[in-house]
Structures are given as C-alpha cells and as structure tokens.
Amino acid sequence: MKTRICSSLMLGLIGSMLAACGGSNSATDSLNSSSKQLVRSQKAAACVAWASGGTYTAGEVVTYNGATYTALVNQTDYAGTGWNPTVGSLFKSGGSCSGSPSPSPSPSPSPSPSPSPSPAPSPSPGCTYSTWSAGIDYSKGTIVKYPANGNYYLEVNNGTNGSDGTDPTISTWYWQPTSCSGSPSPTPTPTPTPTPTPGCSYSTWSAGIDYYKGAVVQYPANGNYYLEVNNGTNGSDGTDPTISTWYWQPTSCSGGSPSPTPTPGGFVVSQSQFSAMFPSANGFYTYNNLVTAMGKYPAFANTGSQTTKLQEAAAFFANVSHETGGLVYINEIAQAPYCGGGSYACAPGQEYYGRGPMQISWNYNYGAAGSALGVDLIDNPGLVATDGVVTWETALWYWMTQSGNIGVTPHNSMVNGPNFGQTINAINGGIECGQAAGSVGNQEMQDRVSLYTKFANMLGVSPGGNTGC
C-alpha cells in the first residue's frame, strides 16, 4: 500500500500560489507583500519542465514533450504510477508562460506513513462526483465525496475490482485527495447477488476464522449468506463479510445444511510448521494452495478435539511425504499407462500414472476424482501435475472419501481412532500391510510410521497406538 504526505513546504507553496491569485487562507496571510510579488514574478517568468517525482499545484503550467499543460489538482507525480501531463484527470492541455523553462523540480523524498489524510485542495470547477458508499468498487478516474469529512478523493489505481471497496481516508494507494465544485452523479449500484445454488453447505460465520475461497457462511446478525471469492494471505484473513467486499460476495444457500464451524485460526498446521516438515519441498507444493484446496473438504483436520485434528494432519503429511519423497516428486518415477476397467474409459494418448501428493493412479481413480472435484481428469490427467490447487484436491479427495480394501477412509481411521495403520491399509495395504519383517513392503510401511511419529512430535501431539499394519 502506498501513502503520501503533504509537507509543510508544500502547504507553504500552495498558500503562496493562492495568494498570487487573490485567494486567502492562513498560509497566504502569513506572506509579506514582497514575498507575494516574488511568487508572481517567478510564475510569469517561465514554465516548469514536468518530471517524474515532481510536485505541482492546481493551475501550474508545465512543459512536456514540447507542449504545455495546466495542472487540474494539487499532486505529486510519484515515479512508477504512470501519472504524467497526458492523464486527463490530473492535467489539461494548454497554458501559457514566458521565458525559458525552469529546471525540473527535484523528486519528492520517499513518503512515510501518515495516520490521517491530507486536507482537500481548493475546489476546481466543473467536475462530477459520487457520494462515497461502503462496499462500492469505484473505477479509476472516479471522484467521490466522503460523507464524514466532506472532502473529495480521486481513484488513481485499480486493484482486482477497481477500488476493491476501500476507504479513501485509509487506502492512499487507491485514492488521492482532490477537489471538486460540480454536481453529484448517481451512486453506483452494488454487484447483484449471484443466482442461488441449491443444496449448498455453509458454516455459521465466526469472528477470527480464516475461511477459504469457495466457502459459504451464514452471518448470524442478519441471517444472510456470503461466498468467499478471493483469498488474502490467510484465506479471508479474519474479515467480516458485511464489510470486506473484496473477500466476500453476497450469495444464497437454499436446501443446505450447516457444516462444522472451523477451528479459530484456520488450519491447525501453520505455514512455518509446514515448511519445517518439508524443507526440500518442490515449489509446486505450496501451503497456500493446500489451504485453498481444503475448502473442498472442510472436515479435514477439523473434526474432533485439537489432539485429533493434529494427529490427522500428521498422518496425512506422513503418507504424502512417503509417496513423494518429502514433497519433492510430482510425477511417478516408474511411469506406466495404468489403464484398467471401471466406469471411466481411458482417453486416447493419456496415461494415468501416479501424480501429486498422494500419487493418484489408474484411470478409474482419475475419473472419480475429477467427477467429485468438477474437473475433467480423464482427458486431462496432467492437471494433477500442473495445477497447484487441483493437485492437493486430489490428495484430499482420496484421504476423505476412499477406503481401499478395508472399507474405512483414512480420515475416519484417524478421527475414530487414532489408527494410523488403517490409513496405510487404505492407501497401499495390499503391498505394505501384513508383510514379512525385512521385506520391501514391510520397510515401506515402517517408513510411513516413522514419518508419522516424527510429524506428530513436531506438532506437539502423541501419535497414539495402532501405528503399523
């Protein structure tokens, strides 16, 4: 976020220029007559050559690319913003001056934060403005009047959705104080509520929870539903759906049922703990993408006591670490087509070898996962190796819904246990469980157990019993 401060020097300069034009304010009255005459004579002598980083006052004439321009508002044209005399909201073409051009103004020093906005400049005639309203996404070039202080602000930078619902007195990267002596334009209409999605699941919104993209919540105070549409640093960053319109959008939820309220603070494993578990992880496997994927399966590591949640997270990470060599490998090393029977016929030219954190393989698993997640993984199995969210979604799909040859999902094995040995059986039990000591299968199983014990200790929780199979 960018901020700006009007220095006392700038205020003095503004006051001097207003005095030269016959205006009056406290800054102008403080100048003696000889100072006023000096300002008038200097202004008549020459135009200033516009330069990036310079500060200009309303009415000042500058030269740029061989032409003259007159500043419409008081401004500092910070480097990198793209502001120059050709920007219609800042300058107008034309203006007269005599003499040789003055040297380019020295760039203003880097701004430092200020807790309050600068005073609004003196009005310029002829502009059109809207009365600022919370929750509206204004577009670049829009002028608003802030009801609380009566000042005007110009929207100078667009975010994801225009001004992203920001407050002009706070978000100084989006907004710049300006002036306006025109008439108000109609207040823009907020984005309409999306078409209801029948049969949705929702959570009751709770302060301090970091929800993730795709989550639907019901706001207790008004009974309305909201969809989380944009992720910040940590999902919704604990924001309020009735205030933070960049994160949240009104929606509806008919025929749905509430899902368990997430634990305050979001995922039980922090990003720093994740990084410590996987110090050599491939950059493809990110913590943020995992947390986004968890929006599809909100009960993951979020059911039962805090101990149960941590044990399930440790168990999941132990299995994916074993499958990928510590989240290093994306694709299976010994690749084969893996085209078998089932309801999902193999697509021509496609292979269904292991990909992603859980190394999902075989056409029937790709087909079922794609159907559950709403993506075509039969014709595009490579998405599991190229889409950072889809890859985690397939791992969570298997963990939460598939039971292998034992009839119990890995998720239920942990929340109704813990029974880490059953998670191994659900994932690769035919090869690793019940094998002779020292055999390859037994060694693979022991590696998963060691990883689970290690990760449980890192999360400060006991691994419990029933760790092998």
Image: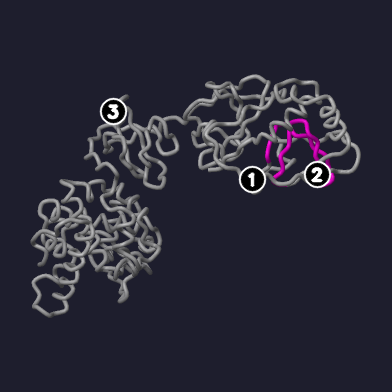
Mark 1 or mark 3: name the one nearer the start of the chain. Answer: 1
- Per the model, the C-alpha gap separating discs 2 and 3 is 58 Å
User: Horizontal placement of 145 versus 309: left or right?
Assistant: right
Mark 2 lies on residue? 49
Q: Percent from the top left, x then y, of residue 289? A: 36, 54
Q: Percent from the top left, x then y, of residue 44? A: 87, 33
- Is residue 356 positioned above or below 257 on the image? below
User: Horizontal placement of 57 versus 137: left or right?
Assistant: right
Q: Percent from the top left, x then y, of residue 207? A: 31, 35
Residue 442 seen by the camera? yes
- Per the model, the C-alpha gap separating discs 1 and 3 is 42 Å
Residue 340 occupies which quadrant of the picture?
A: bottom left
Name the residue type under label 3. Answer: Pro
Mark 2 or mark 1: name the one nearer the start of the chain. Answer: 2
Residue 83 occupies which quadrant of the picture?
A: top right
Q: Does the magenta stretch include residue 456?
A: no
Pick whichever, 82 or 194, lies toward us.
82
Mark 1 lies on residue? 81
Name the residue type under label 1. Answer: Thr
Q: Which is more foreground, mark 2 or mark 1?
A: 2
Mark 3 lies on residue? 220
User: Horizontal placement of 244 versus 313: left or right?
Assistant: right
Q: Does the magenta stretch include residue 59?
A: yes
Mark 2 or mark 3: name the one nearer the start of the chain. Answer: 2
- Label 3 neighbour load within 10 Å: few <14, some 14-19, many 20+: few
Secondary structure found at label 1: loop
Q: Give the range drawn in magenta.
A: 52-76
